[in-house]
Image (spheres, coloured by chain):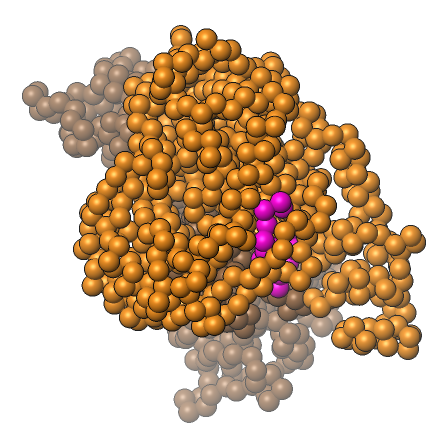
Amino acid sequence: MRFSDTIAAVATPAGAGGIGIVRISGPAALDVFLPLFEFSSPNARMLPRRMVLGRIRDPGSGRALDEVLAVFMPGPRSYTGEDVVEIQAHGGLGVTAAILEAVLSGGARLADPGEFTRRAFLNGRLDLAQAEAVWDMVEARSAREARLAAAQLSGALGRALAPIRASLESLRARLSAAVDFPDEVEAIEPMDIRQGIEHGVLAPLLALARRAAEGELLRRGLSVALLGKPNVGKSSLLNALLGRDRAIVSPYPGTTRDSLSETLTLDGHLVSVWDTAGLRIQSDPLEALGMEKTREAMERADVWIVVVEAHLPLAAEDIALLSEARSRRALVAANKSDLLPVDASFSLPAEWEMLPLVSVSALRGDGLENLSRSVWKLAGLSADPDPEDGVPNLRHRLALEDAARIIRAGLDRADESFLPELLALDLEEALARLGDITGESVAPDVLDAVFSRFCVGK
Amino acid sequence: MSKYDIIVVGAGHAGCEAALAAAKMGLNVAVFVMNADAVAAMPCSPSVGGTGKGQLVKEVDALGGVMARAADLSAIQYRTLNTRKGPAVRSSRTQNDKARHHAVMAGFLLGGEGVHVKQAEVTHLTVEGGRVAGVVDHLGGQHVASCVVLATGTFLSGVIHVGQVSRKAGRAGEFASYSLAADLAALGFRMGRMKTGTPARLLRRSIDFSRFEEERGDEDPRPLSLASRGIALPQVAVHMGYTNSRTHDIVRRNLSRSALYGGVVKGVSARYCPSLEDKVVKFAERERHHVILEPEGLESLEIYASGLGNSLPPDVQIELVRSVDGLEEAEIVRPAYAIEYDYLDPTQLLPTLETKAVAGLFTAGQINGTSGYEEAAAQGLWAGINAACKVMGRPSFLPDRSEAYMAVMVDDLVTRGTREPYRMFTSRAEYRLLLREDNAGERLMEYGHELGLVSADEVKDMRETREAVRAETERVKRVVVKPSAAVNARLSARGMEPLSEAAPLARLLKRPEASYEDVAALCPAEPPVSEEVGRKVEVNVKYEGYIERQVREAERFREMERRRIPEGFDFSGVPGLGNELREKLSFLRPRSLGQASRMEGMTAAGLTALWVALRKRGEA
């Protein structure tokens, strides 16, 4: 789309170290940039897709703002499809902000959030799924998520979908051929078609949808509640986890609403941990309030870690918690393993044996890796999912589930009476839903599939 | 110099419908035909209808066209295809007596009020200021008209191939038309080359029919046309057999002598109608292919050997024919041949089938890249009606893809063009549950009546049937039957499972084995409904849910169709469109966002850009 105005913004996340990039996009990108730029080498020029070294000078004072690398990417072969200039500065919020200000004073307009991507999309540089992947990337809150988004951008989801779509198309072609060439194509076997759909389409579709649910968990972060009686070592366990993996993304102060929540990345997963107030069986009214908050955190958590003391027998509070934990995704962390006699080990009574048990020492940092691995297992996350899998996002998951639901309903209908023309319509609709994921609305010509497969015609 | 409102060039299945429709709308129409003995000829198979095609025939009928009526008067076998599938995809097909079909159509045409049949070859178009003004014939005669419909079939620069021998011909034994093709090219039309072909005709008495399987038609045949009363001619059988590995060896051994494989034929052939060469090469693993022997007519002594189409030399043809079981002694009367002809890339047409470059010039049938008598007839009717509307200053007749197969075909042609001879298939129609043979009248008769092609009485009948169907559908959903001994005895007498709990009639009717008749017998309507109404009620009930779904989808589809792109809209000024798309749009000039969305190469981004641009102008 030929937008008449030229936009600019800082293209790197605020506060991130390293380099800061100011991006200018639009017909006047070069005109805005050149008056600000002083080439290091007097003979240098801006050549397409070549890095040049120079300084950005403040147009008002003439003061050098930073030494930068700049690159010019003429449209349409640029990210947005328009003329683009990118200025790579040494980073620091102050410097990049000053450069952006200089650029804006030169005639560019500050870009709206996501506007570069929107322009790229409208210029046909990205399909819908790619554009969404970029929008997700802009908001990526952990290294893991950035990797997932990158994999999707390169079409990993499209690749995961391809064999499913191929099966669907081939089945639909068989059904269509049976309808359009009743005298020439052998009659279809309903069982064949049903099995083809179950194995070739439904199963992989549902598997992909499950991965989508996993992807959402990653996007929103896994919430883990640390539970246990007072002084069992919940806080020190949290600190130990934080100490092991120093990538604190955003420490929230303990509010009255949350008990105490820390957001951290563990093995690249985004995790919120609630350090809950201890649960007591008997409590005074003041404590009751704190316990209400704890209850809330317990309800919201994806995973519970019930912390008990390894060297002591289970207390009444422990037993109450463990009983509740049986109906949840929960594991037991037997803390203070350092206090156990050398040859002794902690074990759970038979009635709670189904709960995964991890022996840890917050003090010595023992068993923490085991603990996090057990958490991923419980949450249904692999410890290190392959980003090439192309985990879909919420919109994708809905489309996948929709497609699966349509096909399932079609199969149920076909059980009553098998009408190929109706099942073909169901498969077509499912194909259209899958097409929505990558924004391709035009289903490939079913007749191509028919003619390549069947000898039809007299 | 003679003056007409409309001149139709060609009197095949397209030309006849175009002329008769325009004349019925009150206009003065001339039909130019190179050989008046060949009006509505069937140069290929002796049959009308088939999957997708049967629907076209019934649509033509619902709009007052003549194909179905003529086919009823010439039918010697009726067969409903897909009887074991649901009612939406059932299609009618008839075997026809070719001579009779020609005679009936020639009668309609010559007897048509306002129709003037002229035997002459049209050699030139008269074009003045971008508008067609008439035609010139081969004897120098000048004829004036406001609109001209070209329905030239395979005659434009036609060349017939048998083996390595090629001859100029429009059909076997008929002249081709070269100067008109040159005229069209000179007017700047983008022309292409297509190929079709037809199998050999065998001498009836040289065939041992006992080696073939006899295939009879429907036991209870129903006429194609709503206007036909009963079956006109005696009904006959066709005969089915197979090729074998010897047949295939003969073809393989002689491939280099085939016009198709020997490099002679350049035109594009249809994948759904493969020649024997194609079958043997592309489907080498198949051990046999169908051979169907269809009579050319009741009295004709020739048999159409369906499945044996090829472009091999005569000595190979006789060898391969005689390799088939039961054809050992067969004699060929007319050899199989391939034919190449010019067509006009149909993306150069408006949805009315009027050319964009020359106002008032319409094209219909094979000239538009299609194949088939039914496809031709539907386009002829479409072009004839729209040419008449243009002359009369009335709005164009443009039903959409959710209303008719013919609309699907025309939209496909003008929006996406075609790379092979275009044939109708049910899978081309998105809303195929709504586009059934049984409801063609409900879909189109009102339009036909508005156009003056369908009488008030016929519309009244249709409306009454529609109302009866609605009421009876309601009733079978409402009326509950209880599992009494009497009811269950009745059910088992009809081979149906007994009832275990009370259920509405509709639930019983949904059972695959149940027909309306079976179910209505348990609690008959008062007064009983006609067989036709019963069948329609069955469709409504059996497809319940799916029909509603398609209705909703069609609604959404129409929303995009309603977002009109104004005539003369400047696509070059739309920001955000790539150059390629911009050029395509400027050339194709879609009339709605919906049509634009179906263009080849259209992207989601491109459509958004177009939408945004229309929005900015306050359109869409």
Q: Which chain is orange?
A: B
Nearest the viewer among B3 and B205 is B205
Would residue A251 be seen by someone viewing this image from the given angle?
no
Q: Measured from the top left, where is residue A318 in percent x and y? A: 63, 77
Q: Which residue range is magenta in the image?
A: B72-90
- What is the tally of numbered marks visible in this picture? 0
State the quadrant of the C terminus of chain B: top right
Q: Is A129 in the magenta?
A: no
Would residue A338 be seen by someone viewing this image from the given angle?
yes
Quarter of the view holding residue B327: bottom left
Is B214 rendered above or below residue B82?
below
Q: Measured from the top left, where is residue A78 in percent x and y? A: 28, 32
Is A341 rendered above or below residue B618?
below
Nearest the viewer among A224 and B30 is B30
What residue is shown at x 49% (from left), y 20% (from top)? Answer: B7
Q: Is B88 in the magenta?
A: yes
Q: Which chain is brown?
A: A
Quarter of the view holding residue A457: bottom left
